[in-house]
Image (spheres, grey):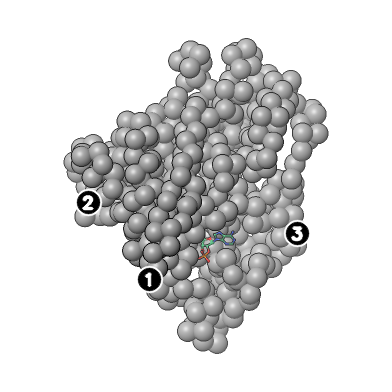
Amino acid sequence: MASESDLHDHHTGVRSAYKHVVRRNPYEPEFQQAVLEVLDNLSPALTRHPEYDDQRILQRLCEPERQVMFRVPWRDDNGNVHVNRGFRVQFNSALGPYKGGLRFHPSVNLGVIKFLGFEQIFKNALTGMSIGGAKGGSDFDPKGRSDNEIERFCQSFMTELHQHLGEHTDVPAGDIGVGAREIGYMFGQYRRLANRWEAGVMTGKGLDWGGSRVRTEATGYGTVLFTQRMLERNGKDLDGRRVVVSGAGNVALYSIERAQQLGANVVACSDSNGYVVDDKGLDLDLLKQVKEVERAGIDVYAERRGQSAHYVRGAGVWEVPCDVALPSATQNELDAKAARTLIDNGVIAVAEGANMPTTPEATSLLRRAGVLFGPGKAANAGGVATSVLEMRQNARRTSWSFDHAEQELAETMAGIHDRCEEAAERYGCPGDYVLGANVAGFERVGNAMLAQGLV
Ligand code: NDP
């Protein structure tokens, strides 16, 4: 992991903000990493705009406005009682109501939710829309749980969380372990407790009851649209490229779908137990059947697909040679060793479908090697942007066609890409999407905080 010493050349405001974060949040390495990654790029903006430092914008940004932690008791199918921990970190509302997903995974703790909430502030700012940043979840493990157990857990979780939500206050969505089924159970419990049909209080809803077309596909599609635009700026495109995707969840599946539609040959993907290589190109219908419908492992995909596919247990999907890599599973899944392998194999672009999947060392290796690098807060912002489109449809009591929603997503991703590009150029680093995303997101939220006074 990068450390404080990496900041020695930086603006004093950046150094003191980071020291403050490390001192105040000592057992939260993911949160410290996410903060360092943003602050590392902000010295030029602070030098150009001393008012940010005068008003301690960095320190204020790094302290969540509100953090909620709560007990989630629930009963399994055998009558045993379990107690999990629930979280909602409402990080920043300068630009709009808090917005960000809920993650159910045993690795969840306060530091993980804070890293995700912090990233979400800048991602949401980059969309150009009116949304603040938040994240939540639980250390509950949905794997192997029955539908009834999932329903009881979601109801218990929402029984506490509902009092902190509202369409103008805080609007959650899905993330790892939270898909349409979980959103349904949580929305139902919210509706019962609040006695309100408040469609805009959650996004990722079913299409028959307030959901938006393209929300399911949006993060994956958006990541690929962002990648395609980065490539086009360099006279290239996805057509005929070998692509490797990690994960086989929501983001991964729809990245594969869009990449295939653009003519790419997607040859590998993974899940938490291993990866599959399929030289003919992945059969997406079979993959969806195994992962979305049957909720089985990708080893089952390899078994059914026959000779062209083989399954490898354990991590290592980045060993598969490719032109374009789309890490779409979880944080810190692409380390320095993997980055070196990708570079040796001639990768030309990496775009983060997941949040912070690339370690700081790996990111800097890829950037130094001249690989086009799309950071998650820009590349995967299509999901949250389409959530805002869902809120818009809810507010107008209307429902758009697939084509219309997809067109809106495409325009939003182009806007995000161009905001990063423009900021990188303005600060003298053309083509540096990491710097561009951090600076453009920061300027928008920082200016809103300056205008709104000391809140
Ligand atoms: P899903 O739960 O749908 O899928 C996650 C996938 O990653 C699964 O295939 C899972 O394996 C795998 N995975 C999860 N944890 C690990 C781990 N520790 N090691 C290896 N593999 C793992 O989640 P999403 O697709 O929604 O989210 C994936 C990433 O994208 C996350 O970083 C999330 O924060 C980010 N993201 C999601 C958005 C969304 O709209 N859903 C929006 C923006 C970012 P298995 O199948 O075995 O469980």
Q: Nearer the viewer, residue 263 or 181?
A: 181
Q: Secondary structure at mark 1?
A: helix
Q: Amino acid at mark 3?
A: Lys
What amino acid is at disc 1? Val
Q: Quadrant of residue 42?
A: top right
State the separation of the CA atoms marked 3 and 2.
46 Å
Q: Position of residue 96 (x, y in %)?
A: 39, 29
Q: Which residue is mark 3?
A: 337
What residue do we see at 37% from left, 71% from top? 293
Sooner in the amino-acid sequence: mark 3 or mark 2: 2
Q: Earlier in the sequence, mark 3 or mark 1?
A: 1
Q: Work out how far the residue at label 3 is from the one at label 1, CA to CA, in angstroms.
A: 34 Å
Kindly identify the amino acid type of the residue bearing the numbered disc 2: Trp
* Disc nearest the viewer among 3 and 2: 2
Q: Disc number at residue 293? A: 1
Q: Is residue 129 left or right of residue 428?
A: left
Q: Is mark 3 within 8 Å of ligand 1?
A: no
Q: Residue at x 59, y 29 (%)?
A: 62
Q: Is residue 98 above or below residue 140?
A: above
Q: Position of residue 434 (x, y in %)?
A: 62, 40
